[in-house]
C-alpha cells in the first residue's frame, strides 16, 4: 500500500503551493464575514476585526465550521457564511460531526529493535488506534541513532477524556496524564518499549469528519454564486481526501473560466 507524505514535513505541501506564481499568501488573518454581492457577481470578504479584505470573483472555503455556531463560541461573532443566503446548504454544512483523537509524539534514544514494522494498528485496545514510526517518512530530520513514533488514540478514548475536561484548552497536567496512559498501552504490547527521551500529547478535537458531504463531486459547488467548499469532510477523512476535494473544486472553477483543468 502506498502512502503519500509531504517532504520534509506535511506542511511542505501547503508551503509549496504558496510559492506558486500568482499566489498571494496572507497569514494571521481570519475571515470573519463573507458577503455575496449579487449586483457585482463577486464576494466581499472582511477579517474578524472588520477590516475589508477586498472583492473576489470566486471563493474556495476549506473550514468545515464556516457556517457553524461553534465559531460564535470561540469568537463571539456569527460564523463567516450566512446560511440565510444559502438555506439549501443549512442541513449539509451547519454542524458537521467529527471524531476526535489524541496524538502522542514519542522520541527514543535508539531505534525500537523489538518492533519489526514501521507501523501497526490496535484492534483490541480501548485507548490506542495505531502507532507509526515517524522517522521512517522520507526527508525527516532525525538525530543519529534516535527514532520518533506517533501514537493515535481511539475516538472513544478521546471523547471520554474531552467530555471529562470540557471544551476548554487542556492543561499541561491533563495532557501529561493522557501521554502516560497512551504510552502505558503502547508498552503493554509486550514489545519491550523503553522509556522515551521525549513525550508530548496533543488534543485533536476535530480530527476526522464523521460524514462526507461532497457526494460524487467530492466538493460542494455553488456555481451561481461561484463558491466551492472543499476539504476532507467533502470526500474522505484523510489528506488524500482533502487533496482530491480541492482538485475537484479547482476543476469546477476552471470550467467556469473555460480553461482546461489539467487535474
Image (tube, rainbow, N blue to C red):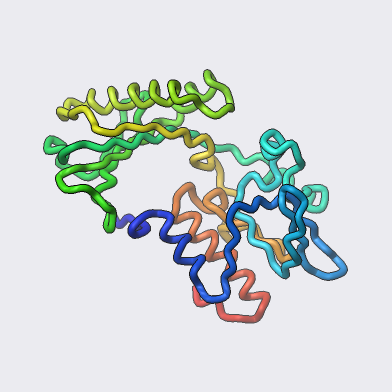
Residue drawn where x is 27% and y is 53% of the image: 141
Residue 112 at x, y percent in the picture: 16, 37
Residue 127 at x, y percent in the picture: 37, 26
Q: Quadrant of residue 24?
A: bottom right
Q: Locate residue 101 relative to residue 63 in the image: left or right.
A: left
Residue 11 at x, y percent in the picture: 43, 55
Residue that protrudes farthest toward the left in the picture: 113
- The correct choice, above or below, for 22 with respect to 132 in the image is below
Q: Locate residue 93 relative to residue 142 in the image: left or right.
A: right
- Number of numbered discs: 0
Q: Locate residue 113 relative to residue 220 in the image: left or right.
A: left
Using the image as rendered, state which of residue 2 and residue 46 is in the foreground.
46
- The correct choice, above or below, for 24 with respect to 89 in the image is below
Name the quadrant of the N terminus. Answer: bottom left
- The correct choice, above or below, for 262 with respect to 128 in the image is below
Residue 122 at x, y percent in the picture: 30, 32
Using the image as rendered, state which of residue 53 and residue 184 is in the foreground.
53
Residue that protrudes farthest toward the right in the picture: 39
Q: Quadrant of residue 94?
A: top right
Residue drawn where x is 39% and y is 21% of the image: 177
Residue drawn where x is 16% and y is 30% of the image: 191
Q: Quadrant of residue 123?
A: top left
Using the image as rendered, state which of residue 125 and residue 47 is in the foreground.
47
* Residue 88 seen in this snapshot: no
* Residue 245 seen in this snapshot: yes
Amino acid at each position: 500500500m502506498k502512502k503519500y507524505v509531504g517532504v520534509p514535513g506535511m506542511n511542505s505541501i501547503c508551503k509549496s503551493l504558496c510559492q506558486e506564481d500568482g499566489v498571494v499568501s496572507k497569514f494571521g488573518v481570519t475571515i470573519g464575514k463573507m458577503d455575496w454581492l449579487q449586483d457585482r457577481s463577486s464576494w466581499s470578504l472582511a477579517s474578524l476585526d472588520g477590516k475589508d479584505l477586498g472583492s473576489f470573483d470566486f471563493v474556495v472555503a476549506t473550514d468545515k465550521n464556516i457556517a457553524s455556531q461553534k465559531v460564535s463560541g470561540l469568537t463571539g461573532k456569527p460564523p463567516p457564511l450566512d446560511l440565510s443566503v444559502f438555506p439549501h446548504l443549512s442541513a449539509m454544512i451547519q454542524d458537521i460531526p467529527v471524531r476526535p483523537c489524541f496524538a502522542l509524539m514519542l522520541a527514543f534514544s535508539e531505534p525500537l529493535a523489538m518492533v519489526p514494522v514501521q507501523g501497526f494498528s490496535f484492534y483490541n485496545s480501548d485507548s490506542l488506534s495505531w502507532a507509526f514510526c515517524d522517522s521512517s517518512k522520507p526527508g525527516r530530520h532525525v538525530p543519529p541513532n534516535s527514532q520518533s513514533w506517533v501514537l493515535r488514540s481511539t475516538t472513544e478514548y478521546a471523547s471520554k477524556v474531552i467530555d471529562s475536561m470540557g471544551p476548554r484548552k487542556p492543561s499541561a497536567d491533563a495532557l501529561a496524564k493522557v501521554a502516560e496512559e497512551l504510552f502505558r498501552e503502547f508498552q503493554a504490547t509486550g514489545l519491550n518499549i523503553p522509556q522515551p527521551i521525549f513525550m508530548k500529547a496533543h488534543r485533536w478535537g476535530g480530527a476526522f469528519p464523521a460524514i462526507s458531504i461532497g457526494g460524487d463531486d467530492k466538493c460542494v459547488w455553488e456555481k451561481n454564486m461561484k463558491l466551492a467548499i472543499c476539504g476532507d469532510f467533502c470526500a474522505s477523512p484523510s489528506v488524500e481526501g482533502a487533496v482530491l476535494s480541492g482538485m475537484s473544486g479547482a476543476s469546477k472553477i476552471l470550467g467556469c473560466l473555460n480553461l482546461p483543468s489539467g487535474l
